[in-house]
Image (spheres, helix red, strand yellow):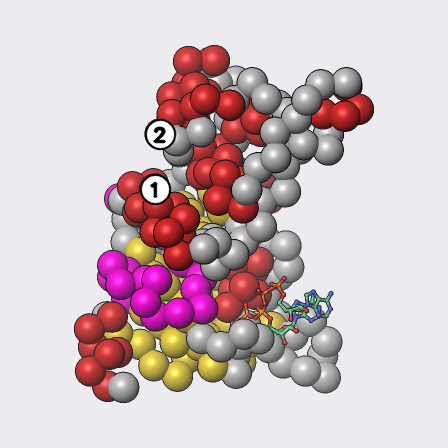
């Protein structure tokens, strides 16, 4: 389903507007990236789409439906979110992946883990949590935690994806590997990518440059590079 942000205004504190009339569309099955400096309001856009907060003026629609008219449950079941920092639940990696689709079979969980290249440790517990049950846990790197979030999203297979700086905390090599995995997941899904840098969103169908709560520029990666 297409996502349409129309004249979106939002402030956490009424005295300090964060989004000041933002309008753009993510056509069905396409990828649109929002880039811009820290504090521009990029993550706020994704939080409004996921309804952690509601817009104060304007509308956000998914498939033509105002997100405020959809139950939070059905909205969130349609959206897969890969956040910046994945916080794992106090249970096995398999449990953490199955959270994306509670009824999924063991085989489907294993296939999703395989696709995200963490197939070998789905039975393990994350380090820290494991001490409580007297087992040796697994220390997961930032990239491995992202792979758990990606496996969860592969299993959930939602029509809409939000990738909120999903690779920004990783080293360059891991970032490239995770990016490749995310490119596969986002193919043919309506995808909103939040990113710091233009270089990480080369393949987006459109890039929106957000500055100070407003759209400063928009275009393809090539178009934006030419204008620099
Ligand atoms: P970006 O993702 O572009 O870095 P954010 O959307 O996260 O920007 O934040 C935009 C602005 O809103 C920042 O100035 C930030 O400090 C502020 N902000 C973000 N979250 C909150 C919050 N929960 N309460 C108050 N201010 C917030
Ligand atoms: P990022 O900047 O990487 O998108 P976050 O989305 O977590 O990270 O936060 C964005 C900014 O909003 C940060 O500068 C953070 O300090 C600020 N922020 C987050 N939550 C609050 C809050 N409750 N009150 C004020 N500022 C906040």
- Mark 1 and mark 2: span between their CA atoms? 8 Å
Which span is picked out in magenta? 188-206
Depicted 115 relative to depicted 133: above or below: below
Question: In percent of the image, x 43 and y 19: which residue is there?
Answer: 110
Question: In percent of the image, x 56 and y 60: which residue is there?
Answer: 48
x then y, percent, for residue 209: 39, 76
* 190 falls in the magenta region: yes
Depicted 141 relative to depicted 14: above or below: above
Q: Please indicate whether residue 31 sits to the left or right of residue 223 in the image.
A: right
Q: Ligand 2 within 8 A of label 2's CB?
A: no
Secondary element type, mark 1: helix
* Badge number at residue 204: none
Looking at the picture, tell me which residue is in the foreground, 2 or 131: 131
x then y, percent, for residue 29: 28, 48
Residue 140 position by quadrant: top right
Sequence-wise, which precedes: disc 1 or disc 2? 2
Neighbourhood count class around disc 1 (C-alpha, 10 Å): few under 14, some 14–19, many 20 upward: some
Q: Please indicate whether residue 26 sits to the left or right of residue 93 in the image.
A: left
Depicted 22 relative to depicted 33: above or below: below
């Amino acid at each position: 389903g297409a996502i349409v942000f129309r004249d979106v205004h939002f402030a956490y504190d009424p005295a300090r507007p964060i989004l000041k009339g933002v309008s753009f569309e993510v056509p069905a099955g396409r990828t649109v990236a929002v880039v811009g400096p820290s504090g521009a309001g990029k993550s706020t856009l994704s939080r409004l789409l996921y309804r952690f907060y509601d817009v104060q003026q304007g509308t956000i629609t998914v498939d033509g439906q105002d997100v405020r008219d959809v139950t939070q449950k059905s909205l969130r079941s349609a959206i897969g979110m890969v956040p910046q920092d994945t916080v794992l639940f106090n249970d096995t990696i398999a449990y953490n992946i199955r959270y994306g689709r509670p009824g999924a079979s063991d085989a489907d969980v294993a296939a999703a883990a395989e696709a995200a290249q963490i197939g070998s440790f789905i039975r393990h517990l994350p380090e820290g949590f494991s001490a409580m049950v007297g087992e040796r846990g697994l220390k997961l790197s930032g990239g491995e935690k992202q792979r758990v979030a990606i496996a969860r999203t592969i299993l959930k297979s939602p029509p809409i994806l939000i990738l909120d700086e999903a690779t920004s905390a990783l080293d360059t090599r891991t970032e490239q590997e995770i990016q490749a995995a995310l490119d596969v997941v986002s193919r043919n899904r309506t995808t909103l990518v939040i990113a710091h840098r233009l270089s990480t969103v080369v393949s987006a169908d459109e890039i929106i440059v957000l500055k100070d709560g407003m759209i400063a520029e928009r275009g393809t990666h090539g178009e934006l590079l030419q204008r620099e």
